[in-house]
Amino acid sequence: MDFRLPPESVELAEAVREYLAGTHGPDVLRRLDAGGNRDLRIWQGLVEMGLTGLLVPESEGGLGMTLLGGALIARECGRACLAEPLVDTALVAVPWLIARGETDDLAVIAAGEKLVALPHAVNPWVADGEGEELASVDPLRNLVAAPEDAGDDPLLLDLGALMSAAQLVGLAEAMLDQAVAYAQVREQFGHAIGGFQAIKHKLADVAVALEFVRPVLWRAAQAMDDGLTSAPLHVSHAKYAATDAAYLAAESAIQVHGAMGYTYEVDLHFWMKRAWALAGAWGDRNFHYHRIEDAALGGAHPLGPQHTFA
Amino acid sequence: MDLAYTPRQQAFRQEVREWLAAHVPAERLVTLERKDGFDQHVAWERELASGNWGMVTWPSEYGGRGLDLIEWLIFEEEYWAAGAPLRANQNGIFLLGPTIMEFGSDEQKARFLPPMAKGEVIWAQAWSEPGAGSDMAAIKTTARRDGDHYVINGQKTWSSRASFADWGFGLFRTEEGSQRHKGLSFLLFDLNAPGITRRPIRQLHGDPGFAELFFDEVRVPVENRIAGEGEGWKVAMATAGFERGLMLRSPGRFQATAARLMALLRETADRASPGLREEVVRLWMGAQAYAYNTYQVAARIMAGGSIGAEASLNKIFWSELDRAMHRAAMHLLGPAAELQTLPDGSANEWLEGYIFSLSGPIYAGSNEIQRNITAERLLGLPRVGAG
């Protein structure tokens, strides 16, 4: 029993955080929003970091990391509000293809030369797919209508939900950081507004929510890595809790920004919109709630302190 | 990351479970906020100690088993799942004990820790004063040096367990005229010493759980001071960290409550509104999240890390989770919620628990103070006003 994140995964995630902070700031999001939405140079940078091959086995030219390691990177993608479809291809499609024994494309995916956009019956859209375009609230999200024959593979759903939850955590963390930064400099009544308890306590509540969603996320990823039969329950817990944390962070952050928060000028809106989008992706809050209720209240999952890691 | 218990940990769980099954009193004890109930709880502490279960993480020389934090969490999980009594000893083993372990001299460890682990000496805490609640640095009670003694004069209040306990610990102003955090010392004192008057305070539930303490020229030997003279604030902050952090409220307690709440929901499913149903499931998720977080912190501490201001996040989370779980139970019970004895003849533990849960967001530093600490020390927001 050792609930510590693997140091090598944490180090890689920190390197990715630093790289994205330096190359993928709000100015980039504005440029993408102004035209194009996707930028091959950004994608190439991610490929050079090895991120397209994160979960691809080393024998196929990848890094062979675990889903837990992948979730740590998905969180960084959320934090940076990354628009490129890295998570869908490298962290959702790749492990799904590996589980199905479909390994032909892995080397090409790791090399960054192939994107995989997978439909699922739970989603009315496919992100970065081909077909009839749908408009998302998120200006950097490219959606097309889902095909009518989309499958409903449960593993694919869990992978999509896990990595969405991880991105939601990163998005929420970034929104909290933005609100804190604004509260430190915005002055009213002769003080930085961050000195007022009404602001402090609102942002402290976001910090509390995040502190208690992160371990749920790591536990869900590890449950999938360990192949636990209870993994879907833990993934649903992570998605549900991450959704609530992201909505709380977004609403708290816009409130702290005041009227500025309600403008297109402040960066916050990119993160809020991505959070709203991902909250409904790969099983919405209702879907995941029912899975949790069925398992926990229905009696299939043992309750009580002795079953913490069941 | 490895989220499976080792065979040794599983065997330990089994050992704890079997001992508790054979020893936990079949009859529910009277509340420890009353003298008769307190005596029953002290007897239970001694029963625990007879099995060497007083405080499993302490070294064996102090009456423990030298176990690690994971084993402590397993012990706590089994303890609360078994429906074992509240710990009369909690101020000692979870707050003062770790403090003495960190700051005490070898003599103090040998003198105070073994009787604490055995339940022979029950400790009360004495932090708050009428003018020093959330603002603890406003302490006024003085401890004047007189040779090899301190002479205490003043008043403490909201002193948990003090109506019936044997000894107390707290912060006193040892430097005349000192201000705020300076000039305070951490002293241990015999509650039966001449000059101490205890006035039990009737609590919300009607029983005298805590007390006011009046000190009139109370002589305390200098060797009862933990750490140096004037270093009391530092020592007290460490104690407060233990209280808010890992030790005071292990997840097993809240997971046991959450499991009982889920069972209550099943019994009352035909009347529970959909909103209440989802609330209960959410609260169970919260108890799980608290457990995962604690295991993560425990793993970090075992690897040489520490718990700092994050302890404030913990305290906010468990105290508000506990209150919300008991509130949900009150709603599920509906018209029976007000009854001291439920229609099936059992004591209404949810009512008692709800009343107690209202103290959680207040004691050990109110949650407003915890939110300030979170905002200032973890988020880096500016301090305004309070010094």
Image (spheres, rainbow, N blue to C red):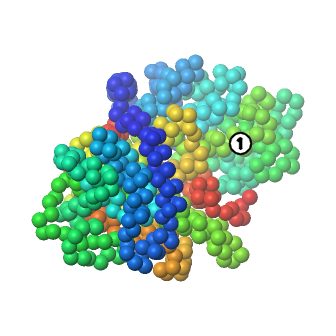
Residue name at image x 50 percent, y 62 percent? A23
**Depth check: A45 or A202 in front?**
A45
Question: Which residue is tagged 1?
Answer: B234
Residue name at image x 21 percent, y 76 percent? A132
Residue farthest top in this picture: B61
**Secondary structure under the numbered disc 1 in the rendered image:** helix
Q: Residue A62, image x and y in percent? A: 33, 45
Quadrant (top left, top right, bottom left, bottom right) of the C terminus of chain B:
bottom right
In this image, B292 relative to B260: left or right? right
Does the image show residue B215?
A: no
Q: Residue B52, image x and y in percent? A: 48, 21
Does the image show residue B223?
A: yes
**Depth check: A20 or B184 in front?**
A20
**Depth check: A179 or B176 in front?**
A179
Residue name at image x 62 percent, y 59 percent? B380
Residue A146, picture quadrant: bottom left
Q: Can you say whether B91 is above or below A258 in the image?
A: above
In this image, B109 relative to B173: left or right? left
**Depth check: B262 or A41 in front?**
A41
Q: Can you say whether B45 is above or below B325 in the image?
A: above
Label 1 crowd (10 A; few <14 / some 14-19 / many >=20): some
Q: How many marks?
A: 1
- Looking at the picture, which amino acid does disc 1 mark? Lys
Q: Can you say whether A63 is above or below B17 in the image?
A: below
Q: Residue B51, image x and y in percent? A: 45, 21
| Chain containing mark 1 | B
